[in-house]
Image: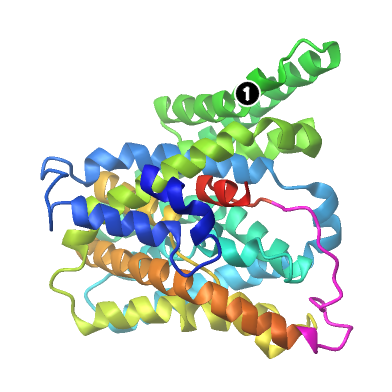
Amino acid sequence: LLAYAAVSRRLSGSPITPAILFVGFGYLLGTEVFEVIGDGVGANRIRLLAEVTLALVLFTDASALDSRVLKTEAGLPARLLGIGLPLTILLGSLIAIWLFPALGVFEAVVLAVLLAPTDAALGQTVVADRRLPSKLRQGLNVESGLNDGVCVPLLFAAVAFSELEEQPTFEGEILVDLVKEVGIAVGVGVVVAGAVAMLVTASKRRRWMDDNWGQVVPLAAAAIAYTATDEIGGSGFIAAFVAGLLFGRLVGSEVVHGTTRLMEELGGVLSAFTFFAFGAVVLGTGIIDLDPSTIVYAVLSLTLIRMVPVAISLLGSGAALPTMTFAGWFGPRGLATIVFMLTIVEQANLPGEDRIVQVATVTVLLSVIAHGITAPVLTDRYVKWLSGRPEGSVVAAHDSPAPAVATRRSLWHRAAQR
């Protein structure tokens, strides 16, 4: 952290991204090279860190959605989430079934859902570049802010049906547990968001709340929603996402933007540690004994499986082929995939678990490197093409910049801005 902070401004906008450095530092200090991180620190030890990080990110991203901006720029994220995401999962499942015959049908779906969420922090150069059209930046931001929350129940359902393939006699029990888990999460999320929003609104109206202490409110709300739901048998991730979504709507974007700075900073630090832990603990075991099928699927996951659905979702929107290609390529896989992978390792008992974890590990590694290196170069090339683009496109060059929506602003990005 100290090493990166010292050169953060110098590296801002360069191909050397924070994720690349933290994964690299982790690998060097991990069990495979210098062994500073001992063998006793396994995947189960870092799962809690990763889960806390994702819970905070889910709450922050969901609460930061600006309804006023979404009313004018909802078209692109709606297409990416409503059309692109389902098609990505479908295509990913079909290719997984083809490449990995040993996986069950629903295990293939688990793998596809695992790799569907995108991580805007890995493509920060893209979503923060004001030269790009507002609608394109906001679309990628909103997609990243919401698709991991949307994928949580889909992942739990896929895991449940995968276990059902192995234990068909427990069909009713598994389905009941799934419905119960989601229902508890939604209920707790609504109650927590409503209660905290009432508290904040009343306190703000009376001017009782100090602005600095107001930063603690979203952090406490996310912690309550996650831990309470987990304690009574629900999904803490869904609860944190629902609570953030409702909290932002109840208190308004102005209050949210004034109280989430601590959450964003803390989320950035925890994300850095998560990528470090990924490099130190997961990466070493995840890239041994690789076969061509694993590498092929990882490459397809970042290209064909992502880019074709995005292109299909943008048909009829007025977006040109370069815009479709640009939006399709910048769908990095990062934090959500790591957390989902560790959750499966700890909580599921799937026969194809080793294959799923290996493919996910290789995909995240390739994404961290490929998207980090290509972001500055491809952004410059796209901006040059866009400068000659005629007006009239849904993401035309004359689109005016708008306030950031659901931007996963990280510690390193804020430091670079300063």
Compared across the picture, whether 112 is left or right of 410 comes to left
Depicted 359 relative to depicted 257: above or below: below
Compared across the picture, whether 27 is left or right of 1 comes to left
How many numbered discs sit on the rendered protein? 1
Residue 22 position, x and y percent, is: 35, 54
Queried whether the magenta region covers residue 389, the answer comes back as yes
Q: Which residue occupies 56% across, 69% down?
A: 86
Residue 331 position, x and y percent, is: 53, 69
Residue 71 seen in the current view: yes
Residue 137 position, x and y percent, is: 70, 65
Residue 171 seen in the current view: no
* Residue at disc 1, secondary structure: helix
Is 67 or 18 nearer to us in this picture?
18
Q: Which residue occupies 59% across, 23% down?
A: 216
User: Mark 1 — residue?
Assistant: 217
Residue 364 position, x and y percent, is: 37, 65
Q: Quadrant of residue 356?
A: bottom left
Q: Which residue occupies 24% across, 60% down?
A: 283
Depicted 225 relative to depicted 418: above or below: above
Is 347 or 134 nearer to us in this picture?
134
Residue type of the residue flagged with mark 1: Val
Q: Which residue occupies 51% across, 67% down?
A: 14
Q: Which residues are magenta?
A: 387-405
Label 1 CA crowd tier, 10 Å (few <14, some 14–19, many 20+): some
Queried whether the magenta region covers residue 273, the answer comes back as no
Q: Quadrant of residue 113?
A: bottom left
Is 20 or 333 nearer to us in this picture?
20
Q: Quadrant of the N terminus?
A: top left
- Secondary structure mainly formed by the magenta segment: loop
In the rendered view, how is the structure colored?
A: rainbow
Depicted 322 relative to depicted 210: above or below: below
